Amino acid sequence: MQRLDPEVLGAHLGRLLRTASVLCDSRESAEDLVQETIARILARPRWLRGGDELAYLTQALRNTFLTSKRTAAPPRAVMALEEFDPADTRTDERPQEALIIGQVFPRLPGCRSRSA
């Protein structure tokens, strides 16, 4: 294993920027991604297996991209089962469908209806 030399990062910036451009929706986002990746790499010493600097840097770029997407994703709304009302009970519009839905999704005790 060899240590990643921070001096060689500049030689790979062009390729990293092109790779980031494929992942990102704008040039500014791609530049930010490369900057974040380089900052993470320089934060602590890195060791390479096999000595392929570009492969390591590209993988680090991809991981930084995926991490940023995961943290930027809006939190999913969590709804308690008691608040969930899947049955459409408007029998005047689709009575047969409402009957089937009522049989598949019976009302749980204590559930509120949509009209309430």
Image (cartoon, helix red, strand yellow):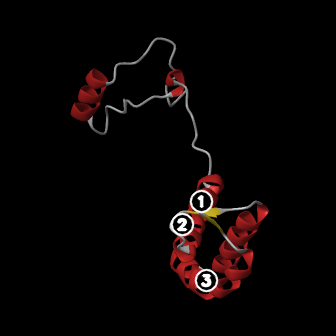
Q: Position of residue 28 (x, y in %)?
A: 68, 81
Q: Report the residue at 21% width, 32% height from top.
A: 96
Q: Which residue type does callout 1 highlight?
A: Lys
Q: Which mark is residue 17?
A: 3
- Placement of 16 over or under 45, stated as above or below: below
Residue closer to the observer: 15 or 10: 10
**Mark whose residue sits in front, 2 or 1:** 2
Q: Which residue type does callout 2 highlight?
A: Gln
Query: Is residue 14 something one can see in this rendering?
Result: yes
Q: Secondary structure at mark 1?
A: helix
Q: Which residue type does callout 3 highlight?
A: Leu
Residue closer to the observer: 69 or 10: 10
Tell me the residue that label 1 is attached to.
69
Q: In the image, 37: left or right of 106?
A: right
Please report whichever mark, 2 or 1, sits nearer to the chain's N-terminal start: 2
Q: Quadrant of residue 36?
A: bottom right
Q: Which mark is residue 59?
A: 2
Q: Quadrant of residue 4?
A: bottom right
Q: In the image, 72: left or right of 45?
A: left
Distance, label 2 to label 1, CA atoms, is 15 Å
Distance, label 3 to label 2, CA atoms, is 13 Å
- Placement of 85 over or under 94, stated as above or below: above
Q: In the image, 31: left or right of 96?
A: right
